[in-house]
């Protein structure tokens, strides 16, 4: 599959999707969103992919939001369809059964922040800025920001960001729990690759089960969430990797997970 608005790379089970419209600060136009959807489907169908990294081309932006030239032309019905399409793709990203990491290397605004927070976690470079500036366009977030951001950083912090449209620095994002780590621009990808390789070396069923239990559990009460965990735990122990992990411990050697699902 050849892409024009993203770059798709796969190496040793680690897929990297690079948003690639640097002249428009990697803004999300319809074609880019379609390509992102295709790449996510390609990744989900490939048993060998263990981690996906999302980042932006150039040194200025991760994604500066939805493409405003396209937005400006939409009527209400078209906007509803556009927003629905965005939600479908971002839900797909959130629920992809492998680990996803956003490597935010500059502006992550509007749809950019919304994509980043749908990943399992974010590593940011020191020059990263986050924001939901839609209010400055007379709009509100349309790719999940009103829902995921309050769940991640709390209702009041999210309201302040969404009501003011102000951008926050990487350090502020770290302080409020929006990102896991802040790194220099030079070391960002190196550190993201390091943790991606570490995660890729773990048992695949365990990773899937943990992700599903956490994601599904966040939307329900604690008792129901704990039931999800019980089932997910049982699933993980039935995997060949669990056999290998427990045996390796007892034999005092390093586990070699094969990643097979059955
Ligand atoms: N869309 C289209 N083009 C963009 C965008 C964008 N979101 N952001 C930047 N660009 C373009 C600029 O127009 C400019 O193009 P050109 O060189 O042809 O003039 C180029 O990128 C470089 O940008 P700037 O010259 O503005 O660079 P600066 O460093 O001066 O400023 C900023 C950088 C602060 C990031 C500034 O570009 C900016 O404010 N961009 C817009 C950010 C924004 O408002 N994002 C939110 C968009 S709305 C959204 O994401 C909603 C998602 C859900 C939609 C669902 C709807 C149905």
Image (spheres, rainbow, N blue to C red):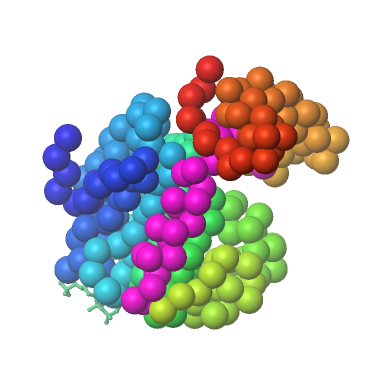
When asked about the image quadrant of residue 253, the answer is top right
Viewer-closest of 95 and 74: 95
Provide the residue span drawn in magenta: 185-214
Question: Does the magenta segment cover residue 144?
Answer: no
Task: Name the image quarter holding the N terminus.
Answer: top left
Viewer-closest of 3 and 158: 3
For the point 52% across and 34% down, the residue is 257
User: In the picture shown, does residue 70 fall above or below 167?
Assistant: above
Q: Is residue 78 left or right of residue 2?
A: right
Q: Is residue 33 left or right of residue 223?
A: left
Q: What secondary structure characterizes most of the magenta part?
A: helix
Q: Residue furthest top?
A: 262
User: In the picture shown, does residue 187 fall above or below 83?
Assistant: below
Question: Does the magenta segment cover residue 187?
Answer: yes
For the point 51% across and 22% down, the residue is 261
Image spot of residue 26 (x, y percent): 26, 62
The total of numbered circles placed on residues is 0
User: In the picture shown, does residue 78 fall above or below 205?
Assistant: below
Quarter, ligand 1: bottom left
Viewer-closest of 50 and 87: 50
Viewer-closest of 202 and 59: 202
For the point 51% across and 47% down, the residue is 199
Q: Residue furthest right?
A: 223
Image spot of residue 239 (x, y percent): 61, 23
Asked if residue 25 shows in the view, the reply is yes
Image spot of residue 76 (x, y percent): 37, 47
């Amino acid at each position: 599959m050849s892409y024009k608005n993203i770059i798709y790379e796969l190496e040793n089970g680690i897929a990297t999707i690079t948003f690639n419209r640097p002249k428009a600060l990697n803004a999300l136009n319809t074609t880019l969103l379609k390509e992102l959807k295709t790449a996510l489907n390609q990744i989900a169908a490939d048993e060998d992919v263990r981690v996906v990294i999302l980042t932006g081309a150039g040194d200025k932006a991760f994604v500066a939001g939805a493409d405003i030239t396209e937005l400006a032309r939409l009527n209400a019905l078209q906007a509803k369809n556009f927003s629905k399409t965005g939600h479908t793709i971002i839900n797909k990203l959130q629920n992809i059964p492998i680990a996803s990491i956003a490597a935010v290397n500059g502006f992550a605004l509007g749809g950019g922040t919304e994509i980043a927070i749908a990943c399992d976690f974010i590593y940011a470079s020191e020059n990263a800025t986050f924001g939901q500036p839609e209010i400055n366009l007379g709009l509100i977030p349309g790719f999940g920001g009103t829902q995921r951001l309050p769940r991640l950083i709390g209702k009041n912090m999210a309201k302040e960001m969404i009501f003011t449209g102000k951008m926050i620095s990487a350090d502020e994002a770290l302080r409020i729990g929006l990102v896991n780590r802040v790194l220099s621009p030079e070391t960002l990808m190196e550190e993201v690759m390091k943790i991606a390789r570490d995660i890729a070396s773990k048992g695949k069923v365990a990773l899937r089960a943990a992700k599903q239990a956490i994601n599904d559990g966040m939307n329900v009460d604690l008792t129901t969430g704990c039931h999800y965990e019980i089932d997910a735990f049982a699933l993980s122990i039935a995997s060949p990797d669990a056999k290998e992990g427990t045996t390796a411990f007892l034999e005092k050697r390093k586990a070699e997970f094969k990643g097979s699902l059955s």
